[in-house]
Image (cartoon, rainbow, N blue to C red):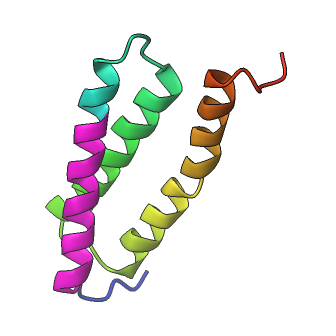
Amino acid sequence: MVIVEQTNEQMRALVVSVGYLIYDLVCCLFDKQVKIDNLIHHLVSAIGLGAGLAYEWCGSETVEALWVTEISSPFLHMREIDTDLNLAAD
């Protein structure tokens, strides 16, 4: 496995992403009903990206992993919006 040296932009992107995931996780805990799938998503993503930062594996592989983990977010949010608007099929 070849790990290229990380750039400042990559590290900054991961720091911002981990910060957002932690912030959003705390906000989710104050929600009326805690959704376990959302909780697990935030925990796994924050821990994984945080480990990449801690071990300085912030290269393109980790940024690509960030894209992979977040690609489902629009679909997750659409499901919640559909449920809130009573558009979801029962």
**What is the x, y in percent for residue 59?**
31, 79
**What is the x, y in percent for residue 39?**
41, 28
Along the viewing direction, whichever of 82 and 44 lies nearer the viewer? 82
Is 17 located above or below residue 73 in the figure? Answer: below
Query: Residue at horizontal 19%, vertical 62%?
Result: 15
Q: Quadrant of residue 14?
A: bottom left
Query: Residue at horizontal 19%, vertical 72%?
Result: 12
Is 2 located above or below residue 16 in the figure? Answer: below
Left or right of residue 48, residue 89 in this image? right
Let me know if residue 10 is in the magenta part. yes
Along the viewing direction, whichever of 22 and 80 lies nearer the viewer? 80
Left or right of residue 80, residue 64 in this image? left
Along the viewing direction, whichever of 18 and 47 lies nearer the viewer? 18
Q: Main secondary structure of the magenta part?
A: helix
Residues shaded magenta:
6-24
Query: Residue at horizontal 67%, vertical 23%?
Result: 83
